[in-house]
Amino acid sequence: MMVQETYKTTWLAKAPEHWNRLRIKNIFAEIDERSETGQEELLSVSHYTGVTKKRDSLENETDFISNAKTLVGYKKVAENDLVSNIMLAWNGSLGISKYNGITSPAYCVYRIKGDNNPNYFGYLFSTAFMKAEFRKKSFGIIDSRLRLYSDKFFSIPAPVPPKAEQDQIVAYIKEQSKKIKHFIKKKQTFIGLLKEQKQSVIDKLLINKGKKVKIKYCVSKIGGGVTPKGGATVYKKSGILFLRSQNIYNDGLYLDNVAYITEEIHSSMKGSQVKKNDVLINVTGGSIGRCYTYFLDEEANVNQHVTIIRPILDILTPEFLMLQLQSDRIQHQIDMIEGASREGLTKGDISNYYLYLPPKEEQAQIVSHIKTETAKIDQAITKAQKEIELIKEYKEAMIAEAVLGKFNHKIVKS
């Protein structure tokens, strides 16, 4: 059924006149096929990565793919199906699957109708204007309670180009995305080289500064966290920060995808409560050894993949401790442990690493000198990171234009 003329006044009017305007119910059909074995590939969906294999997003090999006792009864997904997390669809947590598999029974699975290219609609649904439509049609008092149910999803209008144009748009977006990905990869390689250069400068300024002392003699705590009972199912959209290894980097705390726990759970996990000036270090998996100082004033907690190191502030500054943990000297020792044992970095390992420990006043001077010597490198890193952010913004704008037919047709390969 064609959408009524009232939609001519919206963004939909920007699409070419010869395109159809249809409600999503005329483009996709809901599918509810259930797994009888639970042995299929488990899939997840997010607004960051779209539909992916759940195993690819695990922090460590020892993590469970799912907290469910059985995956029997999970919804089947076929390649090119649209998977929607109805609780976060308003924020873009839906996408076209590249895989056959299964997904949570709480998600919705839709299959393309007729002679249409599902990837065109995957790109369309990722745009800001479509996410605004999803939000308007979602039910809930606050963001964490919003739900986009199928009947409301199906009522949303969408542009439907002829199949040949759908294919052309998809080809164009893929070609441009490939170039953007190559640009980002080159910039990331450049940033990596700059960070190596910076680390070399830091290492030279740290060597033989003061007497050698084992870490255990200049800290008041070395301890890891735990994952709350229920795992990811107890994470909230707000509350107490719950820091995991994907949040800890050598150049900062990355909180875009941070989880939260309730005050009650936080209180029950006293041994892993984080204090300001604690140094947090990843102790397992591919990110082992990454560390950063917690400078925030708000309460936080950590899971079992992160260990808290609490310096005795009278003799050791947090930044000086962090810089030494990040040094090639200690990182090399961590790499040797990781290579020899699947257990990861233990409290005993950390306790027995040696630090160079000059007087506290000299520590501050060394840190200040390091900042001065590495300032230009930091500026170059920031510039490259900004260029990556700008190209990502361009990609979003490019997709938003292309799905409405506004792109250079000559760029598309025949």
Image (cartoon, rainbow, N blue to C red):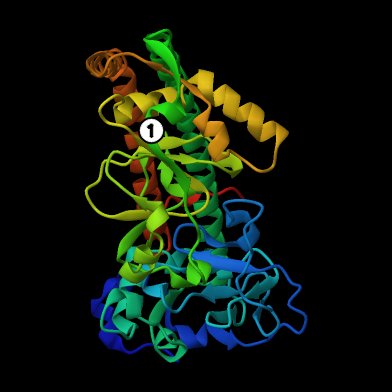
Q: Amino acid at mark 1?
A: Val
Residue plotted at (34% across, 69% down): 262
Residue 36 is left or right of residue 343, and the answer is right
Percent of width and height locating residue 358: 32, 13
Residue plotted at (62% across, 58% down): 63
Residue 386 is left or right of residue 93, and the answer is left
**What residue is pinned by disc 1?**
219
Residue 351 is left or right of residue 279, and the answer is right
Residue 236 in view in this figure: yes
Percent of width and height locating residue 270: 38, 58
Viewer-proximal residue among 208 and 82: 208
Pick out the residue farthest to the front: 217
In the image, is residue 250 above or below residue 243?
above
Residue plotted at (54% across, 52% down): 174
In the image, is residue 240 above or below residue 244?
below
In the image, is residue 378 above or below residue 165?
above
In the image, is residue 268 above or below residue 396?
below
Viewer-proximal residue among 294 and 183: 294
Residue plotted at (76% across, 85% down): 36
Q: Secondary structure at mark 1?
A: strand
- How many numbered discs, if any? 1
Percent of width and height locating residue 351: 50, 31
Neighbourhood count class around disc 1 (C-alpha, 10 Å): few under 14, some 14–19, many 20 upward = some
* Residue 382, quarter of picture: top left
Residue 406 in view in this figure: no
Percent of width and height locating residue 236: 37, 69
Q: Looking at the figure, which quarter contains the N terminus?
A: bottom left
